[in-house]
């Protein structure tokens, strides 16, 4: 079980993403540079948050064409598990890995708050019975306003592809959508940052269960157990 | 050859930036404003001849990179010298 965290120029949540998998879930994790054309051994690819390529043109638009994304496309097409967070979600949408697009928050403000998120029943593991009816996870974005046309929204709803919705919509997203998966169920994208919700000093520890629920889509050993997860040992700064 | 590519938010897509600038215009007394939409102008200079093949390639980069067809429209003007 290997985790690969992509790094683009301007990624800034790559180290947090690394930490949740290393110290939160004790998984072998390494970085993959955007110029690499291969992912190496990977069972989960994480596209982290940040401002890849300065968010020039549109957020995620340039990262989509970086060399490593060819390998991610192949990996995803083979059914590989992808978790795309914040700017990663924007990149995944630009790359066509997930439907829809993200535009400027309707408030025009950069929102950096801990959000209460409604857990939608999407997969056997990503559902309210394992995660609870709501979770609290931080968001930090200026362009998290999820847009999709009516037909696309209907498809998301019919196929149970919506993972999370905001209890109080902070950005104007269509149907309050905070996170979705693809139809096949191997690509997960969300604006909230689970990697900022697992250490004891974080505003919540719900990110760990969310990360587990994503892993469990392909690896049943991550299915939530009835007991609470062990308190992770903090090794960061 | 000089090409101006105009990228604009689709008519049915929210343009929060345009709305905010519209409010500012109104507060400056620029009244009877019906709508404000903000897009981008991308200026390209290309050493190539205009041809149907070239237009096909230009359309492709406009669709794939310069605009996101889910939320934006594009059009371009090719300057005749």
Image: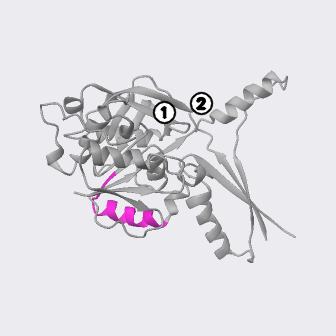
Q: Residues within 10 Å of mark 2 (few under 14, many from 20)?
A: few
Labelled disc at residue A109 = 2
Where residue A73 appears, as percent x and y from the top left, is 39, 62
Drawn side of residue A101 relative to residue B65, left or right: left
User: Which residue occupies 45% across, 45% down?
Assistant: A13
Of the numbered discs 2 and 1, the one sitting upstream in the chain is 2
Please, what secondary structure does the residue beneath circle 2 have? Answer: loop
Pointer 1 chain: A
Residue indicated by mark 1: A173
Front residue of A151 and A206: A206
The question of residue A75 being in magenta is answered with: yes
Drawn side of residue B17 relative to residue B2, left or right: left
Write down the quadrant of residue A106 in the picture: top right
| Magenta residues, dominant SS class | helix
The question of residue A177 being in magenta is answered with: no
Residue located farthest toward the right when viewing the structure as drawn: B81
Res A227 seen here: yes
Where residue A74 appears, as percent x and y from the top left, is 35, 66
Q: How many marks?
A: 2
Q: Is residue B24 above or below residue B1?
A: above
User: Which residue occupies 69% across, 35% down?
Assistant: B18
Where residue A127 appears, as percent x and y from the top left, is 24, 34
Residue located farthest toward the left when viewing the structure as drawn: A226
Q: Residues within 10 Å of mark 1 (few under 14, many from 20)?
A: many
Res A154 seen here: no
Report how far apart the C-alphas of labels 2 and 1 lie in the structure: 14 Å
Q: Quadrant of the N terminus of chain A?
A: bottom left
Q: Is residue A94 above or below residue A198?
A: below
Where residue A232 appears, as percent x and y from the top left, is 25, 37
């Amino acid at each position: 079980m290997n985790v690969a965290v992509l790094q683009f120029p301007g990624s800034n949540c790559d180290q947090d993403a690394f930490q949740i998998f290393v110290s939160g879930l004790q998984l072998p994790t390494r970085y993959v540079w955007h110029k690499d054309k291969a992912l190496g051994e990977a069972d989960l690819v994480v596209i982290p948050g940040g401002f890849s390529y300065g968010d020039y043109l549109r957020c995620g638009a340039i990262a989509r064409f970086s060399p490593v994304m060819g390998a991610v496309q192949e990996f995803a097409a083979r059914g590989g598990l992808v978790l795309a967070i914040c700017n990663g979600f924007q990149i995944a949408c630009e790359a066509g890995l997930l439907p829809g697009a993200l535009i400027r928050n309707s408030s025009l403000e950069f929102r950096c708050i801990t959000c209460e998120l409604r857990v939608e029943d999407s997969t056997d593991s990503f559902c309210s019975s394992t995660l609870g009816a709501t979770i609290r996870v931080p968001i930090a974005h200026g362009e998290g306003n999820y847009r999709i046309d009516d037909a696309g929204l209907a498809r998301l709803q019919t196929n149970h592809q919506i993972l999370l919705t905001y209890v109080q919509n902070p950005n104007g997203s269509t149907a309050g959508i905070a996170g979705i998966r693809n139809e096949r169920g191997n690509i997960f994208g969300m604006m909230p940052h689970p990697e900022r919700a697992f250490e004891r000093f974080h505003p919540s520890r719900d990110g760990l269960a969310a990360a587990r629920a994503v892993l469990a889509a392909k690896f049943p050993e991550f299915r939530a157990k009835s007991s609470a997860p062990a308190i992770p040992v903090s090794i960061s700064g | 050859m000089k090409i101006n590519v105009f990228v604009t938010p689709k008519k049915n897509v929210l343009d929060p930036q345009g709305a905010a600038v519209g409010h500012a215009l109104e507060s400056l007394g620029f009244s009877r404003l019906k709508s404000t939409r903000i897009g981008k102008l991308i200026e390209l200079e290309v050493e190539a001849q205009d041809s149907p093949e070239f237009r096909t390639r230009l359309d492709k980069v406009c669709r794939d990179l310069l605009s996101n067809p889910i939320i934006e429209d594009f059009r371009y003007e090719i300057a005749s010298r």
